[in-house]
Image (cartoon, rainbow, N blue to C red):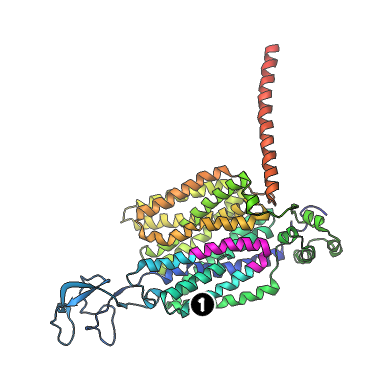
Amino acid sequence: MESGRVVEKFGSFHVLHFFLTCLPALFNAMSNVNFVLLTSDVNYRCRVPECESNRQEYMPTWWPTAVDRCSRPVLNGTIKTTCTNTSFSDALEKCDEWIYETNNTVIAELGLACQPIKANMIGTMHNIAMATSMLLAGRIADWIGRKPTMIFCSVSTFLGIFKTLAPSYYVYIAFEFLEAIGAGGIVTVGLVIMIETSNKKYRLLGGVLFGYFIYTGEVIFACLAMVIPYWKNLLYAVYAPTILFLLYIPISKETLRWLIIHEKVDEAKRLIKTIVKMNKVDIDPNDIDKMDLETMKVACEVETIETKEGYTDAFKSPELVKRFLIGTFCRFTVVFIYYGLTVNSVGLPGNRNMNFLLTSLISYPGDFLCLIFMNRFGRKFPLICGYALCGVTCVLFAFVPSGLNWLKITLYLISKLVVAACYTGVVTYIIELFPTSVRGSLFGLCILFASLGTTLAPLTPSLSTIMMSICFGCSAITSSILLFFVPETNNRQLVDTVEQLEDMMRANKERSVKYRNGHENCGFDHDEESRAH
């Protein structure tokens, strides 16, 4: 059977498989960003028991305007029936109870007034758990399969609904952690499935579609927050549907590449028949029944793997170590800037929900540009230019005068646009750089180390605008430079083993030596011939 015959045609099977893989990413995106709005600050003041009425107001007429919201004004003893502005002395006490303007965020219900570190730690703990999940999910997906790992992570998203039952801050943090550590692996496993399901022509399309579903999740969450202001009702709307991912058990499929590599011949034959039928590939079912493992590998363009490979084998390869380190830093940069800009969007002038929505919407054209440029010009060149442009716009944002808000917002949105394009592009590129035998494991490890960016992003609002912009800009420009040291992968067959990668590198090195020697000899012979004449 001809090489690649089974996987060469893109058809109905791919459309359905792509949709089933991307749908959990939509809900996972809402899970990953809800802390941005749920922990956003609200107005509050200190409660003064002697002055409060039955209908407690956030800003009553008697409240002294010069008092900050973390202090309690001290009564001067002149109070008669009701408090007035003259009922207080100049002394202040530390406040221990507050009146909130609204309870639409967890700040009010968990009593987090004047405790910004606790509020920021919700997002930080979520991202730490998510990073751990990405590492575990990549390893588990290589071990037990892409399908069961994806189903487990998708259903685990439902754990987020239990945050609405949290009676205290620490219980809320515990549920936040459990939700993220269960569901965080969706990105790792989902992207691996998208890349392994696609042929060479549509690998980038798979990554872009996956990114679009993530952005759609962010946009849907922003729209839901506008119409469902109370945080518990908002979480019900986000998490309740995820229990339906249990239906994936009978309807989703394992990736063909994983089945063949793990020599599950009977399952692979059944899946090949499904692919052939849905994509209308002209292959006789009887020919599929006669396939042996080697025939399948040829038909599905899968390289033979004689031994199982893991981290030890991967890190013995200097080329793979270089790719891993560069990929990790580029991934760190893109998530640091992407989520940093998302978190800080609620601090821009205007409505916080609208600002969050705009920064989510701008990601769509970013992915479209990624699809166009990375298919036309390859993977490396657009990423190098994208990181460089993002770095420049981030730095320029800090130095725009305060009166030019339109220019500041324009540069901010350009930065988000470009980093969104790099977000999808670099993930596709990194996955293509790793061999199949360790792809899930290395990608998970890459995401774990790179998740320092998502961990630091919720803390960036505490930095000055200049410092934040310089951090974003320097990391982006550094990534642009590092990408010069990894190879192009566009329209190249995926490498299946570490050994195959090393053989390719040795062959390339030998060709390079022969090429240089050939040019040197040509020059020498030319000189000799000239002297003879």
Would you say 468 lies left or right of 233 here? left
From this viewpoint, is residue 531 visible?
yes
Which residue is found at the position 35% from the left and 77% from the top? Answer: 102
Q: Is residue 143 magenta?
A: yes
- In which quadrant of the rendered image does the C terminus lie? top right
Please name whichever residue, 397 or 148, is drawn nearer the observer in this view of the structure: 148
Residue, far left: 78
Which residue is rendered at x = 69% and y = 20% of the image? 525
**Numbered disc 1: secondary structure:** helix
Residue at (48% x, 72% y) in the render: 174
Q: Is residue 449 above or below residue 250?
A: above
Residue bearing the label numbered 1:
161
At label 1, counting other C-alpha atoms closer than 10 Å, the crowd grade (few under 14, some 14-19, many 20 or more) is many
Quarter that holds the N terminus: bottom right
Q: Residue at x 36, y 53 (%)?
A: 467
Q: Is residue 210 visible?
A: no
In the image as oriented, which residue stretches furthest toward the front?
Answer: 312
Magenta stretch bounds: 127-149
Q: Report if residue 157 lies within the magenta region.
A: no
Quarter holding residue 295: bottom right
Q: Is residue 521 left or right of residue 174?
A: right
Between 25 and 111, which is closer to the camera in this rendering? 111
Residue 40: x and y in percent read 39, 69
User: x%, y% of residue 169?
Assistant: 41, 74
> Callout 1, which amino acid?
Ile
Q: Main secondary structure of the magenta part?
A: helix
Spot occupied by residue 273 in the image (x, y as percentages of width and height): 79, 65
Vertical order, 233 against 507 (above or below): below
Q: Nearer the viewer, residue 121 or 402?
A: 121
Give x and y (percent) for residue 370: 56, 54
